[in-house]
Image: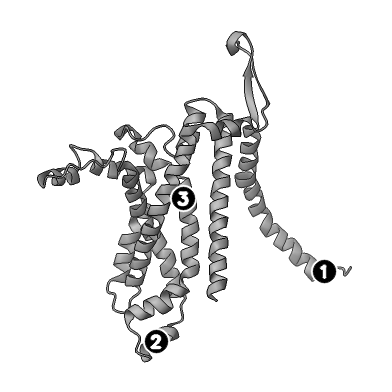
Amino acid sequence: MRRLTRTEARNARVATGFLLPFLALFLLCFIAPIGYAIYQSLLKTERSGPLGLGGGAQEVFAGLDNYAHALQDSTFTSGFGRVLLFGAVQIPVMLALATTLALLLEAASARWVGLFRTAFFLPYGVPGVIASILWGFLYVPGISPFVEMGKSVGWDLDFLSSGTVLWSIANIVTWQYAGYNMLVLVAQLKAVPGELYEAARIDGASAWQVARHIKLPLIRPALVLTTVFSIIGTLQLFAEPLVLQPLSNAINSGYTPNLAAYNEAFKGNNQNIAAAEAVLLALVACALSFGFLRMAGRRGRDGA
């Protein structure tokens, strides 16, 4: 085995020195919380005394009991179905809107690009809680101008009913994140060589043909990335239903998996089951994200 030269050894020490702070933060802020959540999900609290009302309590190994309890909880599992339906509709709509905005702003004839780009991105700078409060004022009857305008033309609008509140939340999320995804797509468009556009124009391609046959195929990696981020974000849906819950009877304690785990931990005082629900949520997010990446990679190879 070849020994490292003095220069190579020094370079290796320097590289290690740069990596150590990142590794320490990665272990402390990412690996350790995951490990602790898994550890907590395998425990349960047993109380002594008649009917378990005694003063003593101890944590014992529960195996997969907490996971079984979570999967048997219809409130928790229905939350998964709800966010999957949410994602199946909201993600394509949001990414289609973001793609359209990116293509329009990068068109050769676009004017005041910087102004519009900033305006479209600004909602992303509004925290989710604040955005939900702002939109809540626009949804509540008696306050909302949209409800009043609907009444003036004979429409009885109810943005917070059981049939519409999910799409009211989808509107908030789309308003917030379409501009962010647009910037990711714009960055990818900026990396496209200008010679391709010139060659297309020389060949007589229209703006629509350039967008369809050059821009869209070349921003495919950015579309895949934004889709994965959106899948993960959908499963993490929390702030919007939490803020709108006092305004709508349709939002229960397990409206989304994140909300169910939160209420289980801090209202039901059962951190072990909440930890199991959090681990299940992470597993579903990983499965859907990697499944989509694999499907996108296979389609990319088939297309190539």
Q: Which residue is mark 1?
A: 6
Determine the residue located farthest toward the left in the rendered image.
Answer: 152
Residue 83 location in percent, x, y?
43, 45
**Which of marks 3 and 1 precedes in the sequence?**
1
Is residue 173 visible to us here?
yes
The answer to whether marks 2 and 3 mark residues whose Cβ atoms lie closer than 8 Å is no
12 in relation to 137, above or below: below
- The amino acid marked with disc number 3 is Gly
Query: Looking at the image, is mark 2 or mark 1 nearer the viewer?
Result: 2
**Which of marks 1 and 2 precedes in the sequence?**
1
Which residue is at a point 54% across and 52% down the rendered structure image?
Answer: 288
Q: Secondary structure at mark 1?
A: helix
Q: Which residue is mark 3?
A: 233
Q: Which residue is mark 2?
A: 200
Q: Which colour assignment does the render follow?
A: one colour
Residue 245 location in percent, x, y?
35, 34
The residue carrying pointer 3 sits among few (fewer than 14), some (14 to 19) or many (20 or more) residues within 10 Å by Cα, namely: some
Q: Secondary structure at mark 3?
A: helix
The answer to whether marks 1 and 3 mark residues whose Cβ atoms lie closer than 8 Å is no
237 in relation to 246, above or below: below
- Left or right of residue 34, residue 103 in this image: left
